[in-house]
């Protein structure tokens, strides 16, 4: 069974803290994605990676960075957490470059920044 | 650039009634189209997708969707819903523009389907 796992289901951090969200996939997928999900806004792409050490900005990269040192692991970093980064964060992975393959999602991390 | 509009933020229906969740998209290139479902406290999972060929596609759990190129729509339908279909549904598009797509998706805002007994 294919699987995408995220390091935490719930996380509470203070303003200004550095926050790491980790995602691991066991499907040998080239592509990995980080989204944030907010009510009424759907999913918005923060960053994605199509290969080890490769990354591209999505639609809302400000305030975030990513790291992909191994194919199976993709980390999202909030350099200095702010209250407007309180959200649900979803990781996904997919195979290939054509766009026809589905994305597989992790269960999400609900981050609260106080 | 691509965009997706889900025309209804919430759809309440009674059990065993039919339902249609509406999705319109805009894109300057040909697209692949997807519907995903998110059950409470879970990640998203694929319901169905349109890549090419027949405009009527069937997915899991009795759902189907019809691609209408002239109206740039991809509406999701089910003839008879169950309580267990209560979830949030997302329409998404992936462009065929070129090699840097890497399967990036543009999502709609989501439609919350609530099935009442």
Image: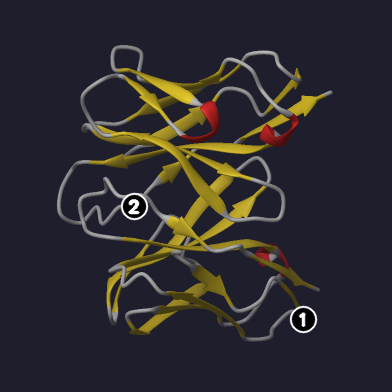
In the image, residue A11 lies at what x, y percent? 73, 76
Q: Residue furthest left?
A: B99
In the image, residue B52 lies at what x, y percent? 22, 29
Q: State which quadrant residue B1 falls in.
A: top left
Q: Indicate the secondary structure of the residue bearing disc 2.
A: loop
Residue A57 vertical position relative to residue B55 in the rendered view, above or below: below
Query: Contact, CB < 8 Å: mark 1 with mark 2?
Result: no
Residue B91 vertical position relative to residue B75 in the rendered view, above or below: below
Residue identifier under label 1: A14
In the image, residue A70 lies at what x, y percent? 34, 85
Residue B20 vertical position relative to residue A48 in the rendered view, above or below: above
Decide which of B15, B69 is in the foreground and name it: B15
Decide which of B27, A5 is in the foreground and name it: A5
Residue B44 vertical position relative to residue B87 in the rendered view, above or below: below
**Residue B62 appears left or right of A48:** right
Q: Are marks 1 and 2 on the same chain?
A: no
Q: What's the residue at 31%, 72% (across, down)?
A: A28
Q: Indicate the secondary structure of the residue bearing disc 1.
A: loop
**Residue A7 appears left or right of B116:** left
- Tell me, yes or no, if residue B109 can be seen here: no
Residue identifier under label 2: B104
Decide which of B23, B16 is in the foreground and name it: B16
Q: The C terminus of chain A lies in which quarter of the figure?
A: bottom right
Q: Tag 2: Cα neighbours inside 10 Å, few (<14), some, or many (≥20)?
A: many
Q: What's the residue at 50%, 52% (across, down)?
A: A44
Q: What's the residue at 59%, 63% (across, down)?
A: A89
């Amino acid at each position: 069974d294919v699987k995408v796992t995220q390091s935490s289901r719930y996380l509470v951090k203070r303003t200004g803290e550095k926050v790491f969200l980790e995602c691991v996939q066991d499907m040998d997928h080239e592509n990995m994605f980080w989204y944030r999900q907010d009510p009424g806004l759907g999913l918005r792409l923060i960053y994605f990676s199509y290969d080890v050490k490769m990354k591209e900005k999505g639609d809302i990269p400000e305030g975030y960075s990513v790291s992909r040192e191994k194919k199976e692991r993709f980390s999202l970093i909030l350099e200095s957490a702010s209250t407007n980064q309180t959200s649900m964060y979803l990781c996904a992975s997919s195979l290939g470059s054509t766009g026809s393959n589905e994305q597989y999602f992790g269960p999400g991390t609900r981050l609260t920044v106080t | 650039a691509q965009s997706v509009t889900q025309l209804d933020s919430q759809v309440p229906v009674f059990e065993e009634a039919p339902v249609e969740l509406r999705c319109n998209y805009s894109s300057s290139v040909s697209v692949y189209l997807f519907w995903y479902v998110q059950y409470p406290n879970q990640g998203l999972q694929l319901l169905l997708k349109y890549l090419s060929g027949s405009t009527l596609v069937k997915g899991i759990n009795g759902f189907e969707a019809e691609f209408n190129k002239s109206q740039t729509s991809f509406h999701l339908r089910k003839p008879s819903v169950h309580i267990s279909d209560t979830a949030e549904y997302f329409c998404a598009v992936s462009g065929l523009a070129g090699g840097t797509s890497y399967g990036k998706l543009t999502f709609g805002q989501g439609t919350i389907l609530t099935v009442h007994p």
